[in-house]
Image (cartoon, rainbow, N blue to C red):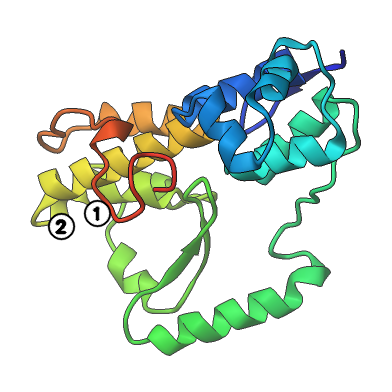
Amino acid sequence: MASVVAVTGTVAAEAPVGELLRQWRQRRRLSQLDLAGEAGVSARHLSFVETGRARPSREMVLLLAEELEIPLGARNELLAAAGFAPVYRRRDLGDPDMAAVRSALDLVLAAYEPFPALVVDRSWHLVAANRALAGLLDGAAPALLEPPVNVLRLSLHPDGLAPRILNLPEWRRHVLHRLGRAAHLSGDLGLAALHRELLALPGGWTGPRPTASRCRCACGPARRC
Protein backbone atom coordinates (compact mmCIF):
# COMPACT_ATOMS: atom_id res chain seq x y z
CA MET A 1 0.00 0.00 0.00
CA ALA A 2 1.44 3.34 -1.08
CA SER A 3 1.68 6.20 1.38
CA VAL A 4 2.43 9.88 1.14
CA VAL A 5 4.33 12.38 3.21
CA ALA A 6 2.94 15.84 2.52
CA VAL A 7 3.27 19.22 4.16
CA THR A 8 1.15 21.80 2.34
CA GLY A 9 -1.34 24.53 3.02
CA THR A 10 -4.02 21.87 3.23
CA VAL A 11 -2.74 19.02 5.37
CA ALA A 12 0.36 17.56 6.92
CA ALA A 13 0.09 13.82 6.70
CA GLU A 14 2.01 10.58 6.56
CA ALA A 15 -0.61 7.92 5.98
CA PRO A 16 -1.95 5.40 3.47
CA VAL A 17 -4.67 6.60 1.14
CA GLY A 18 -7.31 4.67 3.10
CA GLU A 19 -6.41 6.45 6.32
CA LEU A 20 -6.51 9.83 4.58
CA LEU A 21 -9.94 9.07 3.14
CA ARG A 22 -11.18 8.00 6.56
CA GLN A 23 -9.96 11.28 8.08
CA TRP A 24 -11.79 13.28 5.43
CA ARG A 25 -14.97 11.22 5.88
CA GLN A 26 -14.94 11.79 9.62
CA ARG A 27 -14.28 15.49 9.12
CA ARG A 28 -17.44 15.58 7.01
CA ARG A 29 -19.33 13.70 9.76
CA LEU A 30 -20.35 10.89 7.42
CA SER A 31 -20.58 7.19 8.21
CA GLN A 32 -19.13 4.62 5.85
CA LEU A 33 -22.68 3.70 4.90
CA ASP A 34 -23.56 7.32 4.14
CA LEU A 35 -20.52 7.87 1.94
CA ALA A 36 -20.88 4.53 0.19
CA GLY A 37 -24.51 5.32 -0.63
CA GLU A 38 -23.70 8.74 -2.07
CA ALA A 39 -20.76 7.41 -4.07
CA GLY A 40 -22.67 4.39 -5.35
CA VAL A 41 -20.21 1.82 -3.98
CA SER A 42 -20.63 -0.93 -1.41
CA ALA A 43 -19.95 -0.12 2.22
CA ARG A 44 -17.90 -3.30 2.41
CA HIS A 45 -15.57 -2.15 -0.36
CA LEU A 46 -15.23 1.30 1.22
CA SER A 47 -14.33 -0.36 4.52
CA PHE A 48 -11.67 -2.43 2.77
CA VAL A 49 -10.24 0.71 1.16
CA GLU A 50 -10.04 2.58 4.45
CA THR A 51 -8.39 -0.32 6.28
CA GLY A 52 -5.93 -1.00 3.47
CA ARG A 53 -7.36 -4.41 2.54
CA ALA A 54 -8.21 -3.08 -0.93
CA ARG A 55 -6.32 -0.63 -3.10
CA PRO A 56 -8.61 1.94 -4.74
CA SER A 57 -8.39 2.71 -8.43
CA ARG A 58 -7.64 6.21 -9.62
CA GLU A 59 -11.30 6.62 -10.53
CA MET A 60 -12.39 5.48 -7.06
CA VAL A 61 -10.11 7.99 -5.35
CA LEU A 62 -11.46 10.82 -7.49
CA LEU A 63 -15.07 9.69 -6.96
CA LEU A 64 -14.74 9.59 -3.18
CA ALA A 65 -12.87 12.89 -3.16
CA GLU A 66 -15.69 14.49 -5.14
CA GLU A 67 -18.37 13.18 -2.78
CA LEU A 68 -16.35 14.39 0.21
CA GLU A 69 -15.81 17.81 -1.42
CA ILE A 70 -12.08 17.59 -0.77
CA PRO A 71 -9.99 20.60 -1.95
CA LEU A 72 -8.15 19.99 -5.21
CA GLY A 73 -4.70 20.20 -3.63
CA ALA A 74 -5.65 17.51 -1.13
CA ARG A 75 -7.03 15.37 -3.97
CA ASN A 76 -3.56 15.39 -5.48
CA GLU A 77 -2.22 14.16 -2.15
CA LEU A 78 -4.77 11.35 -2.08
CA LEU A 79 -3.79 10.32 -5.60
CA ALA A 80 -0.11 10.33 -4.64
CA ALA A 81 -0.87 8.24 -1.56
CA ALA A 82 -2.64 5.72 -3.78
CA GLY A 83 0.31 5.58 -6.18
CA PHE A 84 -1.11 7.78 -8.95
CA ALA A 85 0.12 11.00 -10.52
CA PRO A 86 -1.55 14.29 -9.49
CA VAL A 87 -4.11 15.63 -11.96
CA TYR A 88 -4.83 19.13 -10.67
CA ARG A 89 -2.49 21.93 -11.62
CA ARG A 90 -2.24 25.06 -9.50
CA ARG A 91 -1.83 28.33 -11.39
CA ASP A 92 -1.42 31.87 -10.12
CA LEU A 93 -3.75 34.60 -11.33
CA GLY A 94 -0.72 36.19 -13.01
CA ASP A 95 -0.10 33.09 -15.13
CA PRO A 96 -0.43 33.86 -18.88
CA ASP A 97 -3.06 31.11 -19.17
CA MET A 98 -5.19 33.04 -16.66
CA ALA A 99 -5.23 36.29 -18.64
CA ALA A 100 -8.88 35.91 -19.61
CA VAL A 101 -9.88 35.27 -15.99
CA ARG A 102 -7.92 38.29 -14.76
CA SER A 103 -9.51 40.48 -17.44
CA ALA A 104 -13.00 39.37 -16.37
CA LEU A 105 -12.22 40.09 -12.71
CA ASP A 106 -10.93 43.54 -13.58
CA LEU A 107 -14.18 44.33 -15.41
CA VAL A 108 -16.26 43.23 -12.43
CA LEU A 109 -14.14 45.23 -9.98
CA ALA A 110 -14.35 48.37 -12.10
CA ALA A 111 -18.12 48.00 -12.39
CA TYR A 112 -18.46 48.30 -8.61
CA GLU A 113 -16.87 51.74 -8.48
CA PRO A 114 -17.34 54.12 -6.73
CA PHE A 115 -17.89 51.38 -4.12
CA PRO A 116 -14.97 49.26 -2.85
CA ALA A 117 -14.66 45.72 -4.19
CA LEU A 118 -11.92 43.14 -3.88
CA VAL A 119 -10.88 39.60 -4.77
CA VAL A 120 -9.36 37.22 -2.22
CA ASP A 121 -7.85 33.75 -2.46
CA ARG A 122 -8.88 30.76 -0.35
CA SER A 123 -6.59 31.96 2.46
CA TRP A 124 -8.28 35.38 2.47
CA HIS A 125 -5.28 37.16 1.02
CA LEU A 126 -5.98 40.18 -1.14
CA VAL A 127 -5.51 39.32 -4.81
CA ALA A 128 -7.03 42.31 -6.59
CA ALA A 129 -9.14 45.36 -5.80
CA ASN A 130 -10.64 48.40 -7.45
CA ARG A 131 -9.48 51.97 -6.87
CA ALA A 132 -12.20 52.68 -4.32
CA LEU A 133 -10.64 50.32 -1.78
CA ALA A 134 -7.78 52.74 -1.08
CA GLY A 135 -10.09 55.17 0.72
CA LEU A 136 -11.43 52.40 2.95
CA LEU A 137 -7.92 51.40 4.01
CA ASP A 138 -6.74 54.92 4.78
CA GLY A 139 -5.33 55.06 8.32
CA ALA A 140 -4.74 51.34 8.73
CA ALA A 141 -1.35 50.34 10.18
CA PRO A 142 1.27 49.99 7.41
CA ALA A 143 2.27 46.56 8.70
CA LEU A 144 -1.24 45.26 7.98
CA LEU A 145 -1.03 46.54 4.41
CA GLU A 146 2.22 44.81 3.53
CA PRO A 147 1.70 42.03 0.95
CA PRO A 148 0.25 39.54 1.26
CA VAL A 149 -2.58 41.49 2.87
CA ASN A 150 -4.97 39.24 4.77
CA VAL A 151 -8.37 40.92 4.67
CA LEU A 152 -9.72 39.11 7.74
CA ARG A 153 -6.75 40.16 9.83
CA LEU A 154 -7.12 43.70 8.51
CA SER A 155 -10.83 43.65 9.29
CA LEU A 156 -10.56 42.50 12.92
CA HIS A 157 -7.24 43.98 14.00
CA PRO A 158 -7.45 47.00 16.38
CA ASP A 159 -4.86 48.76 14.19
CA GLY A 160 -6.87 47.98 11.09
CA LEU A 161 -10.56 48.45 10.34
CA ALA A 162 -11.95 47.12 13.64
CA PRO A 163 -12.37 50.57 15.30
CA ARG A 164 -14.57 51.69 12.38
CA ILE A 165 -16.97 48.74 12.53
CA LEU A 166 -20.06 49.73 14.51
CA ASN A 167 -21.25 46.15 15.07
CA LEU A 168 -17.79 44.72 15.67
CA PRO A 169 -18.84 41.97 18.14
CA GLU A 170 -21.42 40.61 15.71
CA TRP A 171 -19.08 40.91 12.70
CA ARG A 172 -16.23 39.33 14.65
CA ARG A 173 -18.43 36.41 15.68
CA HIS A 174 -19.55 35.88 12.08
CA VAL A 175 -15.99 35.98 10.71
CA LEU A 176 -14.61 33.63 13.35
CA HIS A 177 -17.46 31.18 12.88
CA ARG A 178 -17.02 31.11 9.12
CA LEU A 179 -13.23 30.88 9.29
CA GLY A 180 -13.25 28.17 11.95
CA ARG A 181 -15.73 26.13 9.96
CA ALA A 182 -13.69 26.51 6.76
CA ALA A 183 -10.53 25.45 8.58
CA HIS A 184 -12.25 22.37 9.99
CA LEU A 185 -13.90 21.25 6.76
CA SER A 186 -10.86 21.87 4.57
CA GLY A 187 -8.16 20.66 6.96
CA ASP A 188 -6.17 23.74 5.95
CA LEU A 189 -3.45 24.34 8.54
CA GLY A 190 -3.01 27.95 7.42
CA LEU A 191 -6.69 28.74 7.99
CA ALA A 192 -6.56 27.05 11.37
CA ALA A 193 -3.56 29.17 12.38
CA LEU A 194 -5.30 32.33 11.16
CA HIS A 195 -8.40 31.41 13.17
CA ARG A 196 -6.35 31.04 16.35
CA GLU A 197 -4.60 34.34 15.69
CA LEU A 198 -7.84 36.26 15.13
CA LEU A 199 -9.53 34.59 18.07
CA ALA A 200 -6.86 36.13 20.31
CA LEU A 201 -7.48 39.68 19.08
CA PRO A 202 -9.62 42.02 21.21
CA GLY A 203 -12.97 43.11 19.89
CA GLY A 204 -15.87 41.75 21.88
CA TRP A 205 -17.75 38.58 22.61
CA THR A 206 -17.39 35.79 20.05
CA GLY A 207 -20.20 33.67 21.39
CA PRO A 208 -20.06 29.90 21.80
CA ARG A 209 -18.09 28.22 19.07
CA PRO A 210 -20.69 26.78 16.68
CA THR A 211 -20.49 23.15 15.67
CA ALA A 212 -21.39 21.64 12.32
CA SER A 213 -24.53 20.08 13.76
CA ARG A 214 -25.95 23.56 14.46
CA CYS A 215 -26.05 24.51 10.79
CA ARG A 216 -29.57 25.56 9.85
CA CYS A 217 -29.05 26.66 6.23
CA ALA A 218 -31.01 25.26 3.30
CA CYS A 219 -28.25 22.82 2.41
CA GLY A 220 -29.03 20.66 5.43
CA PRO A 221 -26.67 19.56 8.21
CA ALA A 222 -22.97 20.29 7.99
CA ARG A 223 -21.87 18.56 4.85
CA ARG A 224 -22.98 20.78 1.98
CA CYS A 225 -22.79 24.11 3.81
Instruction: Using the image, tell me which numbered label, if any, was put on residue 161.
Output: 1
In this view of the protein, which residue sits in the foreground, 168 or 76? 76
Residue at x 36% of width, y 44% of height: 153
Disc 1 versus disc 2: distance between alpha carbons? 6 Å
Q: Residue at x 75, y 30 (%)?
A: 78
36 w.r.t. 71: above or below: above
Q: Position of residue 108 (x, y in %)?
A: 50, 83
Residue 107, x across and y down, in percent: 55, 86
Q: In this view, does 171 lie to the left or right of 102?
A: left
Let me know if residue 49 appears in the view: yes
Residue appearing at x 54%, y 54% in the figure: 121
Left or right: 123 as drawn, with respect to 156 = right
Q: Quadrant of the N terminus?
A: top right
Amino acid tagged 1: Leu
Q: Specify few, some or many for label 1: CA neighbours under 10 Å numbering under 14, 14-19, or 20 or more.
A: many
* Viewer-nearest residue: 213 or 153: 213
Do the numbered discs 1 and 2 sit on residues whose CB atoms are within 8 Å? yes
Q: Name the residue under label 2.
A: 164
- The amino acid type, in three-letter code, at marker 2 is Arg
Q: Position of residue 209 (x, y in %)?
A: 22, 28
Please say if 162 is above or below 132. Answer: above
**Residue 191 visible in the current orientation:** no
Provide residue 170's location: percent of width, then percent of height. Answer: 13, 47
